[in-house]
Image: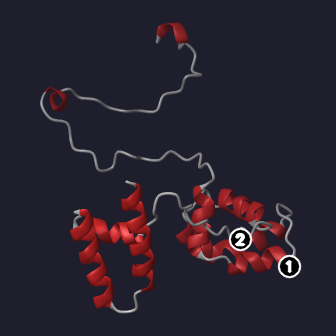
Amino acid sequence: MVSRKEYLMTMHKRYLGAQTRTAKTSIIDEVAQVLGYHRKHAIRVLNGLLPGRKPPVKRHKPLKYLQALPAIQRVWEALDYPCAERLQPVLLETAQLLARHGELNLNSTISQQLAQISRPTLARRIAKWDCPKFRHHALHKRPPSGPQAEVPVGRYEWDERRPGLSKSTW
């Protein structure tokens, strides 16, 4: 195993240094023949991370529009939790309207951020917030079959605060 790792390390360096496609192909063929690997596995090993090496660190970019997030959330709630596609075109106008009525504090920085925010960024921010609206998740469900189809089941709204209903009667 030690000699196999040494061989892979040297071939990995040669593979990364190869300039032409034919040179890389010959290296892949050699590794596949010597180690008995399938070609695809040899390519993955030569391209990928070898044992003993640390994975590359993902670059973390600081979040933008942090000052505008409370204003965005306030507008989102005022408009009854629309999706980002519907919210983005009216975001700045609605925020200015709420500011005129004293419901929101707007300054030039927040206004500029509200005007600049893109729809995908807005969708990512909204996805992290809880939406109190009921969502129908069973839209693509198959209709019941067999005995389930024969039993009528209905849903209706009912008021638990009405007199005569108590938890003991459930």
Image disc number at residue 108: 1
| Residue that extends furthest to the top in the rendered view of this protein | 168
Location of residue 19 in the rendering, given as x and y in whole percent from the top left corner: 40, 91
Colour scheme employed for the rendering of this structure:
secondary structure
Placement of 138 over or under 147, stated as above or below:
below
Place residue 75 in its image quadrant: bottom right
Q: Nearer the viewer, residue 114 or 149?
A: 114
Placement of 157 over or under 48, stated as above or below:
above
Judging from the image, what secondary structure is the residue with disc 1 in?
helix
Quarter of the image with the N terminus is bottom left
Tell me the kind of residue under disc 2: Thr
Q: Residue at x 71, y 80 (%)?
A: 115
| Residue 39 horizontal side relative to residue 139, left or right | left
Location of residue 20 in the rendering, given as x and y in whole percent from the top left corner: 35, 92
**Dot 2 corresponds to which residue?**
94
Mark 1 and mark 2: Cα distance apart in space: 15 Å
| Residue that extends furthest to the front in the rendered view of this protein | 3
Q: Earlier in the sequence, mark 1 or mark 2?
A: 2
Q: Residues within 10 Å of mark 1 (few under 14, many from 20)?
A: few
Judging from the image, what secondary structure is the residue with disc 2 in?
helix
